[in-house]
Amino acid sequence: MYKELEEAWAELTAPGQLFEITEVEVRGQMLKAFALAPDSLRDLWLMSAGYGAADYLVYQDQRWSYSQAHEQVRSIANWLVSHGIQQHDRVAIAMRNYPEWMLSYWAIVSVGACAVGMNSWWVTDEMEFGLRDSAPRLLICDRERLDRFLPVRGNFPEMRLAGVRLSAERPEGVIDWAELIASQPQLPEVSIDPDDDACIFYTSGTTGRPKGAQLTHRGCVNNVMTLGFANAVQASAMAKLNSGAVTAPEKPLAGKPPSAIISTPLFHVTANNCVAQAVTVAGGKLVHMYKWDAGEALRIVEEEKITTFTGVPVMSRELISHPDFARRDTSTLETLGGGGAPVQPDLVDKIDKSAAGARPSQGYGMTEVCGVISALSGPWFVDKPTSAGKAMPTFEIRCVDENGNELPLGQPGEICVKGCQVIKGYINRPEATAETIVDGWLQTGDIGYLDEDGFLFLVDRAKDMVLRGGENVYCSEVEAAIFRNPAVAEAAVFAVPDQRLGEEVGVAIRLNQGDSLNEAQLREFCGNYLAAYKIPRYMWFLDESLPRNASGKFLKRELRERLATTL
């Protein structure tokens, strides 16, 4: 089946095809890109106008068709320009995953301004940092974020403020959302350079302040085409497998429009660039949730006939292990998977066996590439459940040692990629930019290796390893072994300081309700899959859910700081 995949890959990227690959000059370097990629996100958005009366945004009992959304986006865009927002100005968005998030975003990028995605979990001090760092002309926020911002409002006298879903008395000087969408629905004419900033998303660094990554229109548009290619190449390869050699489909993305749940925050690339933008281009439906809840998500899957679910892996795990999973109709699901962290092999198998009709899928990417680097699903994922897939055709990829030397196949090293989706840099952080992007190569900070089929295998984050007496212990490998135990609901492995060995392996665990497991039993279980030095020395069994950040990833530093002090 790898032969069929290679054939489909070559056909779809050949000259004259929809996913033809070319080279373009980007900031003085020749980089891979899709030859037919639109110039900007504005162009991408305008392409969706033809979907007309089809459902686009859904939130609880509220719905927007494509026509209604386009009308409101034109109104917001007109309001922005008439109130002094010019090309390259920044407009910050700070709110839950309300539909107004996407409406604001499309309006901002369509007038050539830059959208700043503010982390909705930030407290007052963090909001103040983000606003000082990005210097937006306007902040669009909901009630919760407004309340957090008001104590420091006086520090931003020149910045306008607009409120969404305030549901209470509107503070003086706060413009109501109703005013924005009441403006004349007329989209101003602008010419946007592909390498203009489309948005700034803040990376969730493990130490210090987050960095504002500059995502370009070129990078975002090519990411959307990357996702289309990932679907198309699998469909073409599957056709070859099922019925012999066939030509590449004329419309590889044809079929019923997709529908997806926005399960992770829109201020990150997973929900925004990889789910929302891709579904929009395909004329699909986006269902917004007030907050993540597996039971509520299953209700939405059944009632809205969701076709694809993408979140962090723990969300997919919670879906298929929820008591309602067997009672809800999930037959419309075509893909079930995640990104932002490796999908553990046991979860790939569980999805493959328990989610009828849904194929397991995974995307590996990061903010710094505007979305995905590699993708994997279907039989290839089942066959290589520990892989993150092949690097998409707009990327060059290599794994290097600590001196930057490229390593042979099968040998782990830092993953480095080059392509037009790599960000321009970090605002106000020239040193961090120079350290991260060297001669056009993005140093991901992830450890991995390539196999003979060109498939990427993630080993761990370079900063998320346990260095135990000179031996590297990869947290993701230990977690994968622990998750094989059916009693385990959540597990996060991290380094614990040790005087003798430097670091030891620690793990925080929450068990499924009604299950029991003790340290001795877990150590014996892990011995079937891990060398003795990799088995956690320190184990904490917690009654409550493990802490997560806004993206749903476990907060290992918080766990380490809280639990290691009990030793």
Image (cartoon, grey):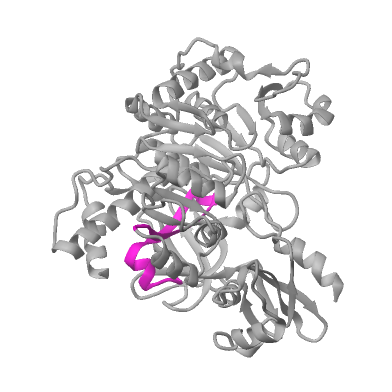
Tell me, yes or no, if residue 270 can be seen here: no
Figure quadrant of the C terminus: bottom right
Q: 360 left or right of 164?
A: left
Q: 190 left or right of 536?
A: left
- The percent position of residue 300, horizontal first and vertical second, equals 48, 43
Is residue 385 found inside the magenta-colored segment of the image? yes
Question: Relative to residue 13, is residue 505 depicted above or below?
Answer: below
Front residue of 184/12: it is 184
Q: 469 left or right of 9?
A: right
Question: Relative to residue 474, is residue 434 depicted above or below?
Answer: above
- The percent position of residue 125, horizontal first and vertical second, equals 80, 40
Chain part drawn in magenta? 357-386
Q: Residue at position x 69%, y 78% from top?
A: 467
Q: Residue furthest top?
A: 184
Front residue of 98/281: it is 98
Front residue of 204/345: it is 345
Q: 390 left or right of 126?
A: left
Is residue 233 found inside the magenta-colored segment of the image? no
Q: Residue at position x 41%, y 36% from top?
A: 280
